[in-house]
């Protein structure tokens, strides 16, 4: 299930903001974020070397901060910072672009599954989430689990 990004000339967005189409006239079935990433990467390649180096440094710093914030007992949006840093690095490095493309495709499929879930499934998921959260709070109280770092 490897998804490889197409070259920038393979898809373009209609001037009215319509769905992207391939050069052969067919509808581009990739997530919008992948199409936008290709356009950003093309524009980024035209920037000067200083701006490109700063983007790489910023991407590395965001990933490092995300890793630190993902540690146990440290509150913060670690996973989101890693993805943001990866999106910076994807402008320069193909490997980062492939990783980001996989994450985007995975998120798009998850969004589609969530949207197509029946109301019964949505209610059941909400109920199970509340039960799991309640079980965690009960365990924290009963077993004196520290929730904040001391």
Image (cartoon, rainbow, N blue to C red):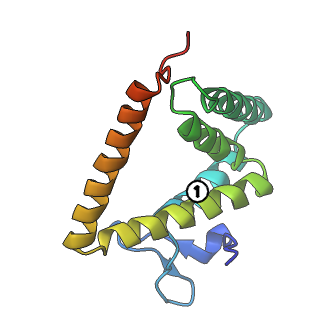
Residue shown at 78% from the left, 32% from the top? 53
Question: Where the N terminus falls, by quadrant?
Answer: bottom right
Residue 37 percent location from the top left of the image: 58, 56
Q: Of residues 4 and 120, which is closer to you in this image?
A: 120
Residue shown at 67% from the left, 69% from the top? 5
Residue 48 percent location from the top left of the image: 74, 36
Q: Where is 88 relative to 137, above or below?
A: below
Q: Residue furthest top?
A: 150
Tell whether 94 sits left or right of 24.
right
**Mark 1 Cα within 10 Å, few/some/many (few <14, many 20+)?**
some
Q: Where is 49 relative to 18, above or below?
A: above
Which type of secondary structure does the marked residue at label 1 adopt? helix
Residue shown at 41% from the left, 38% from the top? 136
Residue 82 lies in what quarter of the image? top right
The residue at which mark 1 appears reads as: 37
Q: Where is 56 relative to 27, above or below?
A: above
Tell whether 4 sits left or right of 79.
right
Residue shown at 77% from the left, 29% from the top? 50
Residue 86 percent location from the top left of the image: 66, 44
Could you tell me if residue 35 is visible in this image? no
Tell whether 26 sits left or right of 9.
left
């Amino acid at each position: 299930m490897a998804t490889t990004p197409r070259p920038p000339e393979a898809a373009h967005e209609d001037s009215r903001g319509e769905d992207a189409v391939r050069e052969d006239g067919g509808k581009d079935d990739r997530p919008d974020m992948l199409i936008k990433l290709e356009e950003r990467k093309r524009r980024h390649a035209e920037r000067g070397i200083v701006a490109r180096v700063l983007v790489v440094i910023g991407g590395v710093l965001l990933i490092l901060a995300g890793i630190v914030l993902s540690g146990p007992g440290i509150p913060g949006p670690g996973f989101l910072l890693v993805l943001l840093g990866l999106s910076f690095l994807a402008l320069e490095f193909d490997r980062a672009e492939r990783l980001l493309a996989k994450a985007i495709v995975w998120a798009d499929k998850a969004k589609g599954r969530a949207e197509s879930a029946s109301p019964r499934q949505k209610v059941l998921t909400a109920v199970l989430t509340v039960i799991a959260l309640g079980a965690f709070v009960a365990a924290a109280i009963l077993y004196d689990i520290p929730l904040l770092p001391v």
